[in-house]
Image: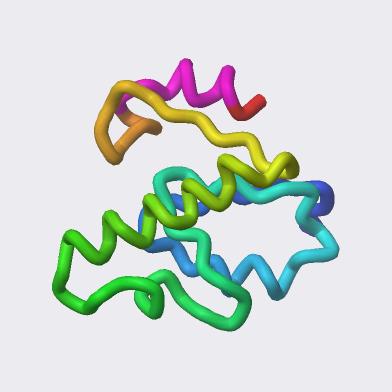
Amino acid sequence: MSLYNITPFLWGWMISGAVEQVLPRVSSIVFLDAHMPDDGTRGLDNTSEFSRKGILAAFDKYLGVCKVDQTWRTFEFPCGHDIMVDMPDRLAIEVA
């Protein structure tokens, strides 16, 4: 089966580089509680190896970038890291 006009959901530490292999088939990307890496980098490249503080700082940095970029939509939900478990109905409505 060939998929076109897809919207992959990248959650947590998912490997976004895989999406680059199928970009012509992708209509949009949803970074769900995930790090948005710069071109050519991985999420781990943007954080200190063992530091939760580094992970949170990187997340906040890219969330801030997305919030000011009019081509992105950002959402914040009153739940933890597993929004697809905690609030699946709300998630489905917001990203539809």
Check the picture and name the quadrant holding the N terminus: bottom right
In the rendering, at what x and y percent does residue 68 appear? Answer: 61, 43
- 50 vs 23, left or right, is left
Q: Residue at x 39, y 79 (%)?
A: 45
In the rendering, at what x and y percent does residue 65 appear? Answer: 55, 52
Identify the coloring: rainbow
Q: Is residue 8 above or below residue 13?
A: above
Q: Nearer the viewer, residue 67 or 92?
A: 67
Check the picture and name the quadrant holding the C terminus: top right
In the rendering, at what x and y percent does residue 48 appear? Answer: 24, 76
Magenta-drawn stretch contains 90: yes
- 52 vs 74, left or right, is left
Q: Residue at x 16, y 69 (%)?
A: 51
Magenta-drawn stretch contains 6: no
Magenta stretch in the rendered image = 86-94
Q: Is residue 75 above or below residue 56?
A: above
Q: Nearer the viewer, residue 81 or 66?
A: 66
Q: Residue at x 49, y 47 (%)?
A: 64
In the rendering, at what x and y percent does residue 9 appear? Answer: 55, 47
- 81 vs 88, left or right, is left
Q: Which secondary structure type mostly characterizes the magenta part of the structure?
A: helix
Q: Residue at x 47, y 44 (%)?
A: 32
Q: Residue pushed farthest front?
A: 68
| Number of numbered discs overlaid on the protein picture | 0
Q: Is residue 71 above or below residue 14?
A: above
Q: Nearer the viewer, residue 57 or 18?
A: 57
